[in-house]
Amino acid sequence: MKKAFLVLLSISLFILTSCLQNDDSDARIPVRYTVIVTDKISGKAVEKAKVELTNEVQSAQSLTTNSSGTVFFPSEESYVNQIVVTKDGYFPKDTVDVISNPDTALSVILRSISIFLVPTDTASVDSTKK
């Protein structure tokens, strides 16, 4: 009985060790970002806004929004990102540290982010006056 237990224990340890050696701790799950940019005042899509996605190693991708105010970033193997949106006539808008939880049950993580830009000409408007 004791010998069978030791054999079973040895096999279990071998299997566990094999699994741990095959674990690739650097494996990254791709994250695909969809960013939707709209005008904070009118609610309309902001076309031709520059959207820059910077990852955790400071590598940046820059795209321009389409007619529906949307950009689609292809797979980014980074879980912490910064998004900066700029357009003439609007205040710059950034969202810092967009964090995606690396769920190993997924083959790709899909993130949708809505960002509102405030037109610069609204800065002089006093919303407290009637």
Image: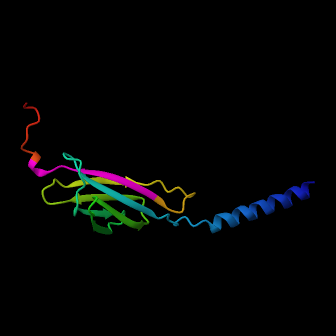
Quarter of the image for residue 19 reads bottom right
Residue at x-position 41% and y-position 66% = 76
Quadrant location of residue 33?
Answer: bottom left
Q: Residue at x 69, y 67 (%)?
A: 18
Magenta segment main secondary structure: strand
Q: How many marks?
A: 0
Q: Quadrant of the C terminus?
A: top left
x, y percentage for residue 77?
Answer: 44, 66
In the depicted view, which residue is nearer to us: 99 or 26?
A: 99
Q: Percent from the top left, x then y, of residue 36?
A: 31, 55
With 5 as the anchor, is 101 left or right in this view?
left
> Compared to 48, does 43 lie above or below?
above
Q: Horizontal placement of 55 versus 77: left or right?
A: left
Where residue 114 sits: x, y (%)? 32, 51
Position of the N terminus, as image quadrant, is bottom right
Look at the image and name its color scheme.
rainbow
Residue 64 falls left or right of residue 91: right
Image quadrant where residue 11 sits: bottom right
Membership of 119 in magenta stretch: yes
Query: Which stretch did the figure color magenta?
Result: 110-121
Picture residue at 51% right of the left edge, 66% below the top: 26
The structure residue drawn at horizontal position 28% and vertical position 59%, both measured from the top left corner, is 68
Q: Is residue 118 magenta?
A: yes
Name the foreground residue: 31 vs 55: 31
Residue 14 at what x, y percent from top left?
75, 65
